[in-house]
Image (spheres, rainbow, N blue to C red):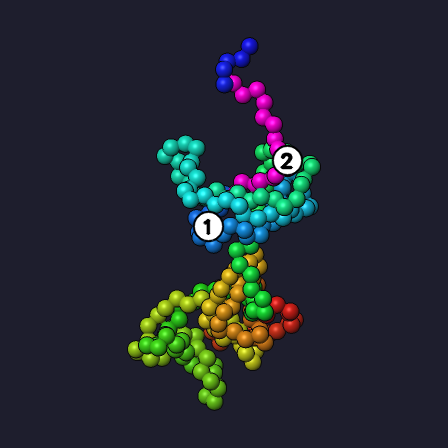
């Protein structure tokens, strides 16, 4: 005997498979219908499945309990392009949604980018002060912590350290789309520039004009 309205069983239709994702509020503005998605199912490792975004939530996902602080996420539905016989309802998964694609661009390793407080003039150009160990005939390459021009002001700038004649020079970089390992550099670098990359604490400790030694020429530029 069962009460009226009691659910006895649920029949899953595997003809169309959908993955329900939670996307952070900072990323949701870039998500569009039809974007390609790579899905990895935790219970079926070592394989990636293709899909496309078919639904984007307009309202954030509400927390299960009231007065609970959590990140603001939005529900995104991805319809898979292939049948997966081994899948079961309720499997957990992770997904990468391709929101933009660029070709023939300069890619900068994420580990190479850093932020420095530099002195800039009224036109927004970096004011570089000569170091004590600079040759008088060299171009001033500064530690820029102290302004050479009283009219300059401090400003936090995102950039990379470019290797020039066995020293590094902080170079502002404008970035575009970002992937898992690289940023797109839309301005500030050319294809032949060599940039310093490595652990965060190493790049953070560099200063404009510090001497460096190139041990190995990497293909990452």
Residue wearing tag 1: 28
Residue 5 against residue 104 in the figure, above or below:
above
Q: Report the magenta stretch's main SS.
A: loop
Q: Which residue is mark 2?
A: 14
Q: Who's the residue at 69% across and 37% down the image?
A: 85
Rendered location of residue 95, percent (x, y): 57, 47
Magenta-tinted stretch: 6-21
The residue lying furthest to the bottom in this view is 137
Residue 179 colored magenta? no
The kind of secondary structure element at disc 2 is: loop
109 vs 29, left or right, is right
- Position of 186 with respect to 9 (left or right) is left
**Closest to the observer: 181 or 27?**
27
Q: Which image quarter: residue 118?
A: bottom left
Mark 2 or 1: the one toward you: 2
Discs 2, 1 touching: Cβ within 8 Å: no
Q: Give the spatial CA distance, label 2 vs label 1.
A: 28 Å
Q: Residue furthest left?
A: 151
Classify residue 12 by image quadrant: top right
Q: Residues within 10 Å of mark 1 (few under 14, many from 20)?
A: some
Q: Which mark is residue 167?
A: none
* Residue 12 painted magenta: yes
Between 158 and 145, the one nearer to me in the picture: 158
- 10 Å crowding of disc 2: few (<14), some (14-19), many (20+): few
Q: Does 110 sit above or below residue 128?
A: above
């Amino acid at each position: 005997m069962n009460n009226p309205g009691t659910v006895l069983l649920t029949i899953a239709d595997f003809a169309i498979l959908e993955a329900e994702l939670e996307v952070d509020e900072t990323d949701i503005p870039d998500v569009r219908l039809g974007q390609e998605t790579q899905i990895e199912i935790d219970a079926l490792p070592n394989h990636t499945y293709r899909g496309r975004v078919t639904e984007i939530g307009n309202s954030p996902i509400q927390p299960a309990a009231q007065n609970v602080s959590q990140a603001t996420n939005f529900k995104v539905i991805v319809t898979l392009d292939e049948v997966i016989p081994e899948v079961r309802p309720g499997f957990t998964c992770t997904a990468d949604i391709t929101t933009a694609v660029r070709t023939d661009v300069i890619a900068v390793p994420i580990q190479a980018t850093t932020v420095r407080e530099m002195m800039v003039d009224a036109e927004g150009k970096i004011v570089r002060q000569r170091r004590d160990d600079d040759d008088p005939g060299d171009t001033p390459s500064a530690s820029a912590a102290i302004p050479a021009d009283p009219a300059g002001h401090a400003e936090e700038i995102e950039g990379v350290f470019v290797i020039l004649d066995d020293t590094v020079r902080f170079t502002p970089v404008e970035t575009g789309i970002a992937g898992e390992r690289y940023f797109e550099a839309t301005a500030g670098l050319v294809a032949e520039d060599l940039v310093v990359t490595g652990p965060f604490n190493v790049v953070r400790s560099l200063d404009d004009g510090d001497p460096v030694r190139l041990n190995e020429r990497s293909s990452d530029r």
